[in-house]
């Protein structure tokens, strides 16, 4: 694996391997000294064309825990707004000797271009591109689901502890909300299917992309029916961007209240979830819109844990991309 | 424009793929057509045309020459030189320049630049609305009466979306036998659109451009044209539904003509998976089913012409994120090969049909049929293109005559090669290469 651009590129073995490595990384994070020497002398550049403090500090923490040097490069603006072009930025990073580039970009496909245009020979990790992909988010979601629910799945292959070695066969995941604009949804659908889980997307029809029929999942417009009849093991709530409802005649739904009424995870719907079911959210949450405070703070919610797992998953991704060569020999986790 | 004093004998050429003959060009016209190997003209330059197909010079109804304003992407001279290499003897230069070709002054400038360059006849297209803003009619009459004799009006790149304005434009141009060439794109349905809306857009996460945004405008416009009894031309049809609407309109006797680009005859939205902005174009590349529908439409005459929508862009405008890149691809130098590959080699069009869709029909729609798109006959203007259909070539953007490198066919092997192009008896291309020495404005 040279780059991590899309979860659709991952085989089942690679995906399970990533999750297993993340589990090893997580185990080291309970030690008193959390820092590993693995990537000492290597340079990771966090290249953010779009603000995302949460994702950036998660990657930064992960890289630092592996002893890599971390450079944060905020490149807000773009070739459109007279900033430096993506190409020149890439050539600059190449000249500076970056070993890995973690890129967040407003344009779908920008990480793909960085990886393939020949501007740069560093490993490229996609930290979210436009409406396309957010692979480490999907990996941390899968990791979280596996930790909690692997014992209920039918794909157990490991020693049982935290689901190591297992895929997600037999598990049902509902992804609820703005699927149309969501890189988290796209990344999750691809990865969850690869790992054997079943996925149902739940959204108002305006927030489901044309062409979704070719996706490997079910689609429903009815959250209540999905919860009651399909009985998901995990419910993943997507953030609804405020701008989606302020577009006048271009609004995707009539009002925040109506959205909450039909698609929000409120206390009433929370109570109908299976006992073992978990509630997820990639953050940041709009409390009172797609998720109520009751749901967000309930003992079913694993939202804070997702953040912690994000560090382990990103450590695993950096490790596998950067230390997969000879320089990693002899490094022991 | 100089006249080439040379007399040419095209030895063994096959006009429209017919029987081999010798064709003699002198003083700007075809002077003799005689049995192959029999023409003997003192001092003539003999062009070996055995097994080559002779076509009337190609006429492009839809070319972006970028001058004035974006001479870094293309100039009238470089664009028409590329046109000649592609076998064209006339191009219609679209109005979305800077300044916009919305006055007699600008269209006359473009026309004059074309005459100075000398590679092909340049017929400026006039903007329908001032500044392409879709609000106020430009002075269409002044452009029609200018030295550029504008007959085709288009806001191409933008749609004349206001139905009242479109109605007025359709009516107004009747006074001088003009035509409105509509870029059919409903603007509200395509805000921020990046590629065809469908399975691929849903997966690659680029904002979709629904087929209905094109089809709704075409449906409206054919009904408007019927109501006011006007002539309508629809630019670059790209969807199966658009073909159906045009077919229906023609069956009702509505005076509508339609074009398809070479790229929409062969490329699909699957190419967006590469995120290579070379494949970003307006209208967007569609699905394989749409490609089949436009081929069928071209074969059965629903679609009247192939026009290149040659849209050169600088590297800066393409070497960037898909979402930031400009729309458009070059096409003048690959158009004939793509038509051969998709339509002739598949048996769906004859070479006579190619002459119709790439020369006679566009000349007629653009009202330049007095000089272009003529039959190959004695006494006719010697605007001719000689093609070797058996040749193959691999497209290399760097080797093309256009000043821009955004060809979507880079690295592809295409059949056919333009061996020679004659503009009123003067060779603009010989042995497949532009004849710079003969052309006044050659670089």
Image: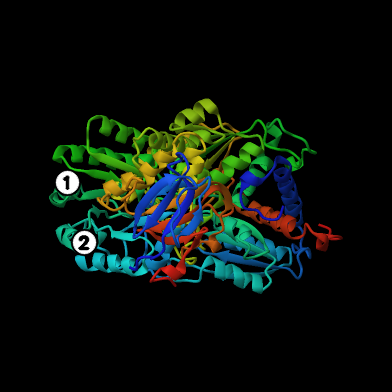
Q: Between residues B439 and B197, which one lies in front from this camera angle?
A: B439
Q: Mark 2 vs mark 1: which is more N-terminal?
A: 2
- The x, y position of residue A109, in whole percent, is 54, 54
Same chain letter for marks 2 and 1: yes
Of all residues, the one furthest to the right in this rendering is A330
Subunit bearing disc 1: B
Q: Residue at x 65, y 73 (%)?
A: A95
- The x, y position of residue B301, in whole percent, is 35, 35
Q: Is residue A152 above or below residue B55?
A: above
Subunit bearing disc 2: B
Q: Is residue A83 above or below residue B164?
A: below
Residue A120 is tagged as none
What is the quadrant of the N terminus of chain B in the image? bottom left
Q: Dot 1 corresponds to which residue?
A: B167
Q: Is residue B326 visible?
A: no
- The x, y position of residue B129, in whole percent, is 21, 57
Q: Is residue A46 left or right of residue A295?
A: right
Label 2: how many Cα within 10 Å (few below 14, some 14–19, many 20+): some
Q: Is residue B240 above or below residue B135?
A: above
Regarding mark 1 in the picture, which secondary structure is present there? helix
In three-dimensional space, the C-alpha distance between marks 2 and 1, rounded to whole angstroms, equals 16 Å
Q: Residue at x 59, y 67 (%)?
A: A90
Q: Between residues A212 and B312, which one lies in front from this camera angle?
A: B312
Q: Is residue A86 visible?
A: yes
Residue B130 is tagged as 2
Label 1: how many Cα within 10 Å (few below 14, some 14–19, many 20+): some
- The x, y position of residue A178, in whole percent, is 45, 44
Residue B150 occupies quadrant: bottom left
């Amino acid at each position: 694996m040279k780059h991590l651009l899309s979860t659709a590129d991952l085989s089942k073995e690679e995906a399970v391997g990533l999750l297993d490595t993340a589990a090893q990384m997580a185990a080291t994070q309970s030690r008193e000294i959390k820092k590993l020497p693995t990537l000492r002398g290597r340079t990771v550049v966090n290249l953010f064309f779009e603000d995302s403090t949460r994702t950036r500090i998660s990657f930064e923490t992960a890289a630092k825990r592996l002893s890599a040097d971390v450079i944060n490069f905020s490149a807000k603006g773009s070739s459109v707004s007279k900033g430096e072009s993506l190409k020149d930025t890439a050539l600059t990073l190449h000249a500076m000797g970056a070993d890995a580039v973690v890129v967040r970009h407003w344009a779908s496909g920008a990480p793909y271009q960085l990886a393939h245009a020949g501007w740069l020979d560093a490993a490229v990790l996609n930290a979210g591109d436009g409406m396309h992909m957010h692979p480490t988010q999907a990996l941390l979601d899968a990791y979280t689901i596996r930790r909690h629910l692997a014992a209920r799945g039918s794909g157990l292959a490991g020693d049982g502890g935290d689901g190591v070695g297992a895929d997600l066969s037999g598990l049902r995941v509902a992804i609820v909300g703005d699927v149309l604009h969501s890189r988290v949804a796209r990344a999750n659908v691809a990865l969850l299917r690869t790992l054997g889980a079943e996925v149902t997307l739940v959204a108002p029809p305006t927030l489901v992309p044309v062409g979704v029929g070719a996706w490997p999942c079910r689609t429903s417009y009815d959250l209540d029916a999905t919860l009651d009849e399909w009985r998901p093991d995990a419910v993943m709530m997507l953030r609804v961007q405020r701008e989606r409802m302020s577009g006048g005649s271009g609004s995707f739904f009539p009002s925040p209240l109506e959205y909450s009424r039909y698609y929000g995870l409120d206390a009433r719907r929370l109570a109908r979830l299976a006992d073992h079911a978990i509630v997820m959210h990639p953050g940041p949450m709009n409390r009172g819109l797609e998720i109520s405070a009751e749901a967000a703070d309930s003992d079913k919610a694993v939202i804070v844990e997702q953040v912690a797992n994000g560090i382990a998953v990103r450590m695993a991704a950096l490790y596998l991309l950067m230390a997969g060569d000879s320089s990693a020999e002899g490094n022991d986790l | 424009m100089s006249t080439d004093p040379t007399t040419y004998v095209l030895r063994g050429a096959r006009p429209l793929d017919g029987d081999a003959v010798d064709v003699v060009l002198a003083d700007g016209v075809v002077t003799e057509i005689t049995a192959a190997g029999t023409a003997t003209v003192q001092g003539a330059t003999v062009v070996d045309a055995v097994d080559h197909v002779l076509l009337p010079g190609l006429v492009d109804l839809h070319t972006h020459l970028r001058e004035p304003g974006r001479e870094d992407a293309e100039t009238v001279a470089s664009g028409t030189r590329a046109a000649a290499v592609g076998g064209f003897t006339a191009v219609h230069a679209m109005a979305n320049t800077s300044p916009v070709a919305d006055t007699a002054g600008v269209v006359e400038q473009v026309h004059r630049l074309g005459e100075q360059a000398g590679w092909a006849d340049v017929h400026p297209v006039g903007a329908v609305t001032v500044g392409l803003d879709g609000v106020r009619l430009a002075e269409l009459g002044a452009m029609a009466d200018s030295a550029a004799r504008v007959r085709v009006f288009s806001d191409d790149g933008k749609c004349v979306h206001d139905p009242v304005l479109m109605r007025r434009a359709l009516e107004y141009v009747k006074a001088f036998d003009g035509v409105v060439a509509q870029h059919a794109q409903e603007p509200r349905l395509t805000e921020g659109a990046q590629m065809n809306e469908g399975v691929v857009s849903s997966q690659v996460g680029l904002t979709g451009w629904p087929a209905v945004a094109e089809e709704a405008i075409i449906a409206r416009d054919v009904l408007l044209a019927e109501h006011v009894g006007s002539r309508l031309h629809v630019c670059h049809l790209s969807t199966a539904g658009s073909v159906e609407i045009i077919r229906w309109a023609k069956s009702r006797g509505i005076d509508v003509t339609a074009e398809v680009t070479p790229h929409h005859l062969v490329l699909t939205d699957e190419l967006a998976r590469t995120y290579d902005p070379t494949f970003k174009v307006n209208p967007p590349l569609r699905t394989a089913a749409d490609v089949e529908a436009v081929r069928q439409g071209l074969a059965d005459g629903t679609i009247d012409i192939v026009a290149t929508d040659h849209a050169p862009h600088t590297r800066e405008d393409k070497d960037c994120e898909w979402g930031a890149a400009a729309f458009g691809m070059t096409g003048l130098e690959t158009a004939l090969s793509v038509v051969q590959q998709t339509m002739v080699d598949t048996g769906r069009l004859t070479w006579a049909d190619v002459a119709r869709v790439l020369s006679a029909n566009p000349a007629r729609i653009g009202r330049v049929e007095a000089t272009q798109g003529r039959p190959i006959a004695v006494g006719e203007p010697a605007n001719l293109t000689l093609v070797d259909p058996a040749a193959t070539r691999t497209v290399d953007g760097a080797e093309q005559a256009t000043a821009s490198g955004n060809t979507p066919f880079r690295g592809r092997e295409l059949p056919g090669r333009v061996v020679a192009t004659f503009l009123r008896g003067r060779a603009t291309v010989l042995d497949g290469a532009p004849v710079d020495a003969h052309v006044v404005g050659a670089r």
